[in-house]
Image (cartoon, coloured by chain):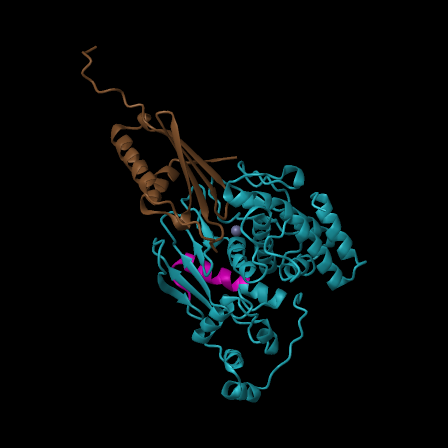
Chain colours: A brown, B cyan
Amino acid sequence: MTGSTKPPRNTGMQLRFVQTGGVGGVKLVAEINTSQLPPSETASIEHLVDAALAEAPPKTETSRVRDDLQYEVHVTRGGTTTSFHASERDLAPNVAALVKRLAERAEPRR
Amino acid sequence: MAIYSQRPTCIVPPDLLKRLILEGDSEVRVRALETLSLDISVRQARAEIAGRRDFDTRPLGSLVDAGGTPNRVIHDQAQATTGVGAVARGEGQPASKDSAVNEAYDGLGATYKFYWEACRRDSIDAAGMLMDGLVHYGTNYNNAMWDGDQMLFGDGDGLLFTRFTASLDVIGHELTHGVTQYELNLVYSSQAGALNESMSDVMGSLVKQYALKQTAPQADWLIGPDCVGPKLKPALRSMKAPGTANSYDNQPADMDGYVKTMEDHGGVHTNSGIPNHAFYLLAIKLGGNAWERAGRIWYETLRDPKLRPNSGFRSFASATVRQAGIIYGTSSAEVSAVREAWSAVKVL
Ligand SMILES: [Zn+2]
């Protein structure tokens, strides 16, 4: 036990990622608490979340795309949840990068 | 072989066509030119005209019943998700060393053959549209889709999915999204969206059954058995037994299980299980080749001018009864079988 010189413990972000649609119609879910990730990954994923949230929301025009993957991302931080929804053919660059990271950790759910 | 189209056809002599090109008003000239020309550039122009949807191109299709030969272009995306990759194989070119390229080429060919021989339909737009297939879309990409103009095929990550080009029913499914866009153009949301999805599964399955020469009882009625990885085996969906295709399949087989959700455009890939199962029940009841009677009724329903793009299950079901009556007579066994199928899934 040392003195109280450590910075306050990072409580992290809770991330919930849900992918639906696609020709398979398979639902994939990832639930991540960034504080439980290796420190280097925590920083990079939190940075990516902030960058994605700061991006302009995607267009909502009627699309002719069929079987597109749909993504929902819910970010909970300090008791507040922010969510967004996007289609794979309509992703802003940082959202695309975040979705790619989260999808790698997602598993099928009924 | 079933011929679905009831529209009359007549052959216009080439001399008359030439005169129309020289003397007709602009629309007549465009149409006469299209009729005479079969080269790729004219077919592309024709597809664009058809794609505008501000006038019906069908009278031309029936004026001179050209067609019967596919026009495929397979592009290698080399993992890109934007733009269109280099042409890897065009119509009539020899096989590539790349199996995904050849599978897409052959699968689009089999789909074209089904629509032409069984439905008397000349490609996606019924006017000879070029069929563009983009393979190796994305990196280990777990999806295939129709983007409004062309078909995109990922390679899969090997766990959830393997390469989508290996699945003939999925190729038929994607191309049918194009056919639906040019016909009823069902809205991609809730019940209309589930009907859009179901139409793609029905026709995708029929493309496979037609290629394998399988009767309704012989068919597996599975979607995607050839593109699922170990986590999703044995298939994506079952028209015979919705909800049983893999451990995560939650498709309902009837209206008691209808899922109200905001996800996936209102559950379009979930509730499609209901019309899928109705089609399966009809095909089994009628027996024989599913594309001949059940398929013909569904295809004519997709072209029913009384239906609207936002049609729900009940309107669509009523239209299938109406079409069965037009084709086979209102007191036919086919009409009874259609009613029974929709009643079994608790739609009618
Ligand atoms: Zn689809």
Q: Quarter of the image for the N terminus of chain B: give it.
A: bottom right
Secondary structure character of the magenta stretch overall:
helix
Residue B54 percent across, percent down from the top left:
53, 68
Q: Is residue B6 above or below residue B136?
A: below
Residue B36 percent across, percent down from the top left:
51, 81
Magenta residues?
B95-111
The answer to whether residue B235 is seen in the rendering is: no
Image side of residue B7 versus residue B334, left or right: left
Image side of residue B24 versus residue A54, left or right: right
Residue at horizontal 65%, vertical 46%? B277
Q: Nearer the viewer, residue B136 or B229?
A: B136
Residue A15 percent across, percent down from the top left:
38, 31
Q: Which residue of the protein is positioned furthest toward the right in this rendering?
A: B331
* Quadrant in the rendering for residue B214: bottom right
Q: Is residue B255 above or below residue B279?
A: above
Q: Is residue B174 magenta?
A: no
Q: Nearer the viewer, residue A53 or B172?
A: A53
Residue B287 percent across, percent down from the top left:
72, 54
Residue at horizontal 55%, vertical 61%? B179
* Quadrant in the rendering for residue B91: bottom left
Q: Is residue B107 magenta?
A: yes
Residue at horizontal 33%, vertical 29%? A34
